[in-house]
């Protein structure tokens, strides 16, 4: 599932508004990213934990040449699934019914007033476009060849 499909799946919970669903998704992702970049862990109960991990510099091996190379220290994002999520994925625990989207009652349409219609105007007959005359070609010019006499 990509982000667009995720938003489409959430839209029914926002009265069919993909715009509101997209805004909610963007706010959640932005909050997670900002907290992780600040070094804070983001724990969501029964789902998992997002955290920033510092990796030390180490020696590695180039798989093509086999030579050893030095890998720089880096910072990575890590997700640790919660026990409940692991159990659901493994099939040990059943997932509850999906929450039903809240649908607000549609507003009642306003009473329509009878509007007086102006008499229909007759459309002017369209004239057929004038035919263009074919452009006449200029007569071909004869090129005189002048033979030079050699002495």
Image (cartoon, helix red, strand yellow):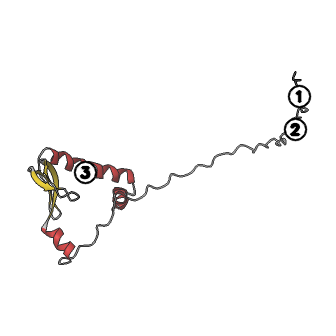
Label 3 neighbour load within 10 Å: few <14, some 14-19, many 20+: few
Do the numbered discs 1 and 3 sit on residues whose CB atoms are within 8 Å?
no
Dot 3 corresponds to which residue? Answer: 29
| Apparent side of residue 102 relative to residue 117 in the rendered image (left or right) | left
Distance CA(mark 2)–CA(mark 3)? 67 Å
Do the numbered discs 2 and 3 sit on residues whose CB atoms are within 8 Å?
no
74 is higher (above) or lower (below) than 44: above
> Sequence order check: which comes first, mark 1 or mark 3?
3
**Towards the viewer: 42 or 111:** 42
Q: Residue at x 18, y 63 (%)?
A: 47
Distance CA(mark 1)–CA(mark 3)? 83 Å
**Towards the viewer: 144 or 47:** 144
Q: Quadrant of residue 132?
A: top right
- For marks 2 and 3, give the one nearer the viewer: 2
Dot 2 corresponds to which residue? Answer: 134
Pinpoint residue 19: horizontal percent, then vertical percent: 38, 50
Locate the N terminus by quadrant: bottom left
Dot 1 corresponds to which residue? Answer: 145
128 is higher (above) or lower (below) than 90: above
């Amino acid at each position: 599932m990509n982000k667009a499909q995720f938003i489409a799946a959430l839209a029914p919970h926002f009265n069919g508004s993909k715009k509101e669903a997209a805004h909610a998704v963007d706010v959640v992702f932005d909050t997670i990213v900002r907290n992780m970049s600040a070094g804070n862990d983001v724990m969501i109960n029964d789902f998992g934990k997002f955290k920033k991990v510092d990796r030390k510099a180490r020696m590695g091996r180039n798989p093509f040449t086999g030579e050893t190379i030095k890998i720089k220290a880096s910072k990575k994002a890590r997700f640790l699934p919660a026990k409940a999520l692991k159990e659901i994925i493994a099939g040990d625990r059943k997932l509850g019914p999906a929450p039903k989207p809240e649908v607000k009652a549609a507003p009642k349409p306003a009473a329509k007033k009878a509007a007086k219609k102006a008499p229909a105007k007759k459309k002017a007959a369209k004239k057929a476009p004038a035919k263009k005359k074919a452009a006449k070609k200029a007569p071909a010019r004869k090129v005189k060849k002048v033979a030079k006499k050699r002495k």
